Image (cartoon, helix red, strand yellow):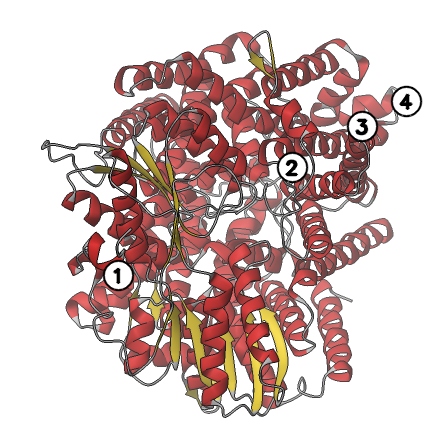
Amino acid sequence: MTGGKVDPGESEILNGMERNLLMNISIRMTSILMVLALFLVSCTKPHVENSGKTGGESIAVFTKNQTNPYFQTVRLGAENAARQMNAAVVQYIPTVSDSITEQLSEIEDAIIKRPGAVVFIPVNSKAMIPGIEKLNAAGIPVVNVTDRVLGGQIVSFMGCDETKLAVNTGRFLLQKMNGRGNVVILEGRGGSENSVNRVAGYRKALEEFPNVKLLASQPADFQRVQALQVTENLLQSYPQIDGILAANDSMALGAIEALDAARRKSLVVGINGTLEAIDAIKAGKLLATGDCDGFRHGCLGTMAAVRHLRNLPVPKEFIFSLTVIDSTNYAGMDVPYEQRMCPKWESIVKDK
Amino acid sequence: MADTRRRIPGIAWLLATLILFFSIFGTRFASAPNLINIGNQSSILMLLALPMTLIIMTEGLDLSMGAVLGLSGVVLALLLVNGHALPLAFAAALGVGTLFGFANGVLVVALGMPPFVATLGMLGVAQGIALAMTNGESVSGIGSVLPRIYASRWMGIPFAILVAVTAYAVFHFLLYHTRIGTYVFAIGGNREALLLAGVPAKRYHVLIYAIGGLMAGAGAFLLTGRMSVGHPTAAVGMEFDAMVAVIVGGTKLERGNGWLPGTVLGVLTVGVLKNGLNVMAVPSSLQIASIGMLVIVALLIDTLRGRS
Amino acid sequence: MSSVAWRLLGVLLLCVVLALSSSAFLTVGNLLNVLRQASLIFLIAAGLTFVILSAGLDLSIGANLGLSACLAAAAIKATGSISIGIAAGVACGTTIGILNGLLITTLRLPPFIAIYGMLWMVYGINYWAMAGNTIYGFPESFRVIGSGYFMGIPIPVLLMVLCLIVGSVFTRYTTWGHEIYAIGANPEVARLSGIPVRRRLIMVYTLSGAMSGLAGIVYLARLNSAEAGIGEPLLLPAIAAVLIGGTSLFGGVGSLSGALIGAVILTLVLNGMNLLTISGNWQPLITGVILLLAAGIDTVARKWNESRA
């Protein structure tokens, strides 16, 4: 059976007693090492230390997963902003990517620690409503960033309209195609709202260009290798693909690898605005990437949370401008995130 | 057969150590609200781990539980959205779960497919149907009855914990005090004896898988209440958590060795670890590594005790 | 007919169906694509086959692949040398494999769960080390491993064939190979016949780890980038490929050629779904049904054979 222990049997070198002793020792040593490791791991401090000066608010930041570089930029923005404002950030990321149950559990666990405020990106806009309500009941203010949560009380929503972002990005591609030709859509993961919203946006953009034919819309799980293989397959089916609308940058880049390998050309767009995508734009491989600047989300969301705790004004809603980054406007975006600084609150949020 | 006296200390020591550790180094870990949270967070897993214990005792496993739970939850939610009463919707969810469990049982027992492949295939089927029914989106608008039931407390104890405790009581009785329980041990440990005694072992074997599906449906009730929506992929991967809990709790994948109380300890250990790591704000990547370490340490303790 | 022959028939049937459904299927380009996609699965499935033959299971192959690819990527970037990168990746995979083997033999932990624990530990280390970043952009001379051709055949396919030949010779014509089958069929009898079971087990897990490392290199070359978690979606397809190919989880039965056929079947299914533009919501369902069909036919055929024997 899959798990049945196979008894290695008597050793060929040591006799029975010595072998037992060796095994016992190995087991104990390994156990002690592991327990020590667990101890050390648990005593790891969170990423940003409280500087000890005035302020010292603790902000809990919830992001969706560890795999998507977009959320890494949000977290970096949050930490940057916290440093600037003498606050501290605690990061909550599900160990299983995009897990609804885990994020709900994380909210409960965070409430125990009584953070001053929460900056929240929901794994799912509807399923997390009970979580927001729990935070409300505990009296912890919530700033919602990036993806809107569709219930509960929030101090502010700061983000962009994902569908609109996809519409703009799609429109950009279709205009570059002069409104004529064939396109394919690379969808994300089944059950993911981001995928649903972005594909909806792309389809909406397509409605504006009746002379463009949508050949296929296939899922590639937001992953690079799947996108590569799916694109490969589609390239076989369709001798003429003029545009590829990918629901995220990883898939766009995977599609580009497939195009390169097949020595075919196609205009490709993605969404997320990752550094790698910008590099691809610089290299002329990627046409554009729709960006909502996760770094700024992290910055301003955290600033809003801290401001709220300090009784400073915070707008109820703030929609970031959407940018379709292409070869003309990437300057300033291609800075490694560790070097970026949060913009000043006043320069972004005017007279609120 | 299970030698419970020797096995009791192993996982219990580990659980106690973790609780002690987090109580000392984690602020407010040992507070009542947090402990209740752990119970709440562990209850859905408990509902899956209990039947998984039986399945593993018969040298099988069920990889489809998470997907079936998701599908049952979707069915439950869709019926509620369309105005049907909760009891009916709940019955339907249980029915869907049991159907898939039964299908698993037929494939494994009647057809003789390796459980890994059979349940993996059914995972895809359940997942696919759930995605197709919902177009990948959440099903919302289920009304307030179910969420309120989930959030209710009876003498201060949350509903979910009560359900989990009741489930344990039922399974304990089933396994240790009924004929069916004896058959479960026998199917794992000494199938020939059963057949010689004229017992239709296959029937009970299929029943075990069907119970697994039934509990997935029950879990869907709790999860949908917790999220206030039905979602096709909400429980993906839970079956692995259940298997870890069962095996870390002392049930072996070898024939007929099962210990149900150990499953409870296993579920609680996993819940305590995850909660404790969050309370101590350990970075997520290291949390992942810690879970792996927990598994290996638990197995080591088990092996060590088995040796002495 | 032998089980491999039955499966080849199944592959042919699938091909006929696809060729009739889509005019794009039966082209050289598409078939080479399918083979190349299959080879990526096969490389990990091959190592896994050895483990499953010995009645074990290695769930860490995906995590292993990811960590090895990331390590190789970092090494290439740090030293500028492709050979060092490749060595680092394979070494990483092999080390994890050796650790797995030791867990099973010296510490005597049950393979299924213990290596599942390793899976989590490796992912944890991988995520922690990468910190959400991606390492990308490698020289053409390295990328050719994944995307290049040699005499018109994609290099990963050549690697797959090489692997198949060496592996098959190993399993069928060497003592070590025979011993692995014996251990899988009946470990007690194997031990009593003097087979050094523990050493062989460490060997198979090391092999599996090494193959995961190698597969990681090929992935890195094909994708031109590495990030933590790239191996996650590969575990279940790899296991499915091995099982569809006729290798039994109970050990002692199976072959590498079976794993190759399994990989090809899985890839054909995906290829077909893309060519026929089947909606994303239906794809898991179809994959699940095909898996059940393949396993079902296999089970029924095996029973039929047993009853006749």
**Mark 4 = which residue?**
B198
**Nearer-N-terminus badge (4/2):** 2
Nearer to us in this view, A110 or B10: A110
| Amino acid residing under circle 3 | Pro
Q: CA distance from mark 1 to mark 2?
A: 36 Å
In the picture of the structure, the residue carrying the numbered disc 3 is B87
Circle 3 SS class: helix
Residue C63 position (above or below residue A170): above
Q: Which residue is mark 1?
A: C88
- Label 1 or label 2, whichever lies nearer to me, is 2
The image quarter in which residue B185 lies: top right
Of callouts 3 and 2, the N-terminal one: 2
Q: Return the residue at label 2.
A: B61
The image's mark for residue C142 is none
Q: Position of residue B102 (x, y in %)?
A: 80, 38
Q: B55 above or below B10?
A: below
Q: Residues within 10 Å of mark 3 (few under 14, many from 20)?
A: few
Is A223 left, or right, of A276 in this rendering?
A: right
Q: Amino acid at mark 4?
A: Gly
Circle 2 marks a residue in which chain? B
**Which of the chains bears the disc numbered 4?**
B
- Does C267 sit left or right of A103 as displayed? right
Labels 1, 4: one chain? no
Q: Secondary structure at mark 1?
A: helix
User: Camera-side residue: B22 or B247?
Assistant: B22
Instruction: Say which amino acid is labelled 2.
Output: Leu
**Percent x, y of residue B59:** 66, 33
Front tag of 3 and 1: 3
Callouts 3 and 1 in the same chain: no
